[in-house]
């Protein structure tokens, strides 16, 4: 099979388009012929070595946190899936990732793709959808609450807007001025263009802030929360926890391979409640260029998807 692989941390130059042996379905696993995989900020930060204090990768490594395609083989102990099923899969950080034409994963790491979704749409919903769902669960968003979502035009931010709107919250979001109409179409009630305005001077008394940025944005986010509010952060940039100073709860969202959470997102998308956002597609062979675009911040309005 064709795959992307690197044997050391570094720039995108370490990424190679190679031929690898096809994987096989082990005990309790399914073998999937992949059609698509998403490119996440986590992928390039891991490849660049920014996360070595948290993750020690086995080398060589095939990156990618998710994928989608068709089941081509199943182990005899698998009961939920059969050959021909379209599935979205969650790939382990420490095993082969989704930047490949095939992958073997455990039954617990896959869900069926609803009929109304294309495989590309399902992949755009997989890792980003897990992040959004678990963020909302962490912050315990309720109907009628005021919620601020940072980076609303991004893959996770766009899904957070849709989820919070669905739950009945009043949603504010930050984005570039060029994306204001886009985030409104996702359900945002109030939009602050961060390249023109300072959100901290315009918003107040919010119940929840979702911080997908860190750094200075995190620091200013405390000012828009009411006492007793909640700040949930999902970012690798440095933060200073000032929860005690402002009387708010600060929680890091821990994104795990949660089949129940992914199934919930697929059900919402299958029912037309949530719409996956695809920024663009690129062939697997151009994965290095995809990483360069992500590093430059040149990808918005959803998830960048590699196709096989």
Image: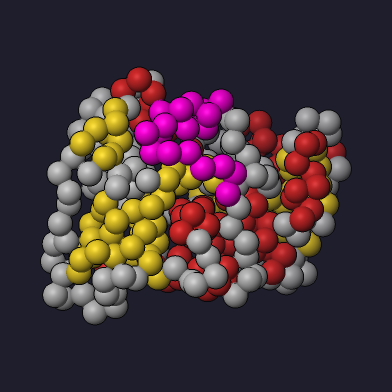
Seen at 24% across and 47% down, the residue is 95
Q: Which residues are magenta?
A: 278-296
The part of the image, by quadrant, that contains residue 108 is bottom left
Q: Is residue 10 above or below residue 60?
A: above
Does residue 128 belong to the magenta stretch? no
Q: Answer with left or right where residue 107 lies relative to residue 253.
A: left
Could you tell me if residue 42 is visible in this image?
no
List x then y, in percent, for residue 38.
45, 46
Q: Answer with left or right where residue 71 lies relative to residue 160.
A: left
Seen at 56% across and 25% down, the residue is 296
Image quadrant holding the N terminus, namely top left
User: Residue 162 or 21: which is nearer the viewer?
Assistant: 21
User: Residue 19 or 295: which is nearer the viewer?
Assistant: 19
List x then y, in percent, for residue 167.
68, 70
The part of the image, by quadrant, that contains residue 301 is top right
Could you tell me if residue 75 is visible in this image?
yes
List x then y, in percent, for residue 113.
44, 68
Does residue 281 belong to the magenta stretch? yes
Q: Is residue 294 above or below residue 244?
A: above
List x then y, in percent, for residue 197.
84, 34
User: Residue 179 or 280: which is nearer the viewer?
Assistant: 280
Q: Magenta region, mostly helix, strand or loop?
A: helix
Q: How many marks?
A: 0
């Amino acid at each position: 099979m064709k795959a992307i692989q690197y044997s050391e941390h570094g720039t995108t130059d370490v990424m190679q388009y190679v031929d690898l042996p096809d994987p096989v379905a082990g005990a309790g696993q399914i073998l999937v012929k992949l059609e698509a995989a998403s490119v996440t900020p986590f992928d390039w930060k891991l490849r660049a070595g920014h996360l070595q204090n948290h993750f020690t990768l086995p080398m060589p490594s095939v990156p990618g946190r998710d994928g989608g395609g068709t089941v081509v083989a199943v182990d005899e102990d698998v009961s939920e899936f059969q050959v021909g099923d379209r599935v979205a899969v969650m790939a382990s950080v420490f095993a082969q990732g989704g930047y490949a034409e095939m992958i073997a994963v455990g039954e617990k790491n896959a869900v069926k793709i609803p009929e109304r979704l294309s495989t590309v749409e399902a992949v755009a919903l997989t890792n980003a959808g897990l992040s959004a769902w678990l963020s909302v669960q962490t912050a315990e968003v309720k109907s009628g609450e005021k919620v601020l979502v940072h980076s609303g035009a991004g893959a996770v931010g766009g899904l957070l807007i849709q989820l919070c709107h669905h739950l009945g919250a009043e949603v504010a979001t930050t984005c570039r001025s060029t994306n204001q109409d886009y985030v409104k179409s996702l359900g945002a009630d109030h939009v602050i263009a961060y390249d023109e305005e300072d959100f901290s001077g315009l918003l107040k008394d919010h119940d929840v802030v979702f911080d997908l940025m860190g750094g200075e944005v995190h620091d200013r986010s405390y000012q828009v929360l009411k006492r007793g509010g909640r700040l949930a952060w999902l970012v690798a940039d440095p933060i200073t926890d000032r929860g005690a100073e402002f009387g708010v709860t600060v929680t890091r969202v821990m994104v795990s391979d949660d089949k129940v959470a992914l199934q919930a997102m697929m059900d919402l998308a299958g029912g037309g409640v949530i719409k996956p956002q695809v920024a663009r597609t690129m062939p697997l062979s151009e994965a290095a260029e995809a990483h360069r675009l992500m590093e430059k911040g040149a990808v918005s309005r959803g998830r960048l998807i590699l196709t096989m």
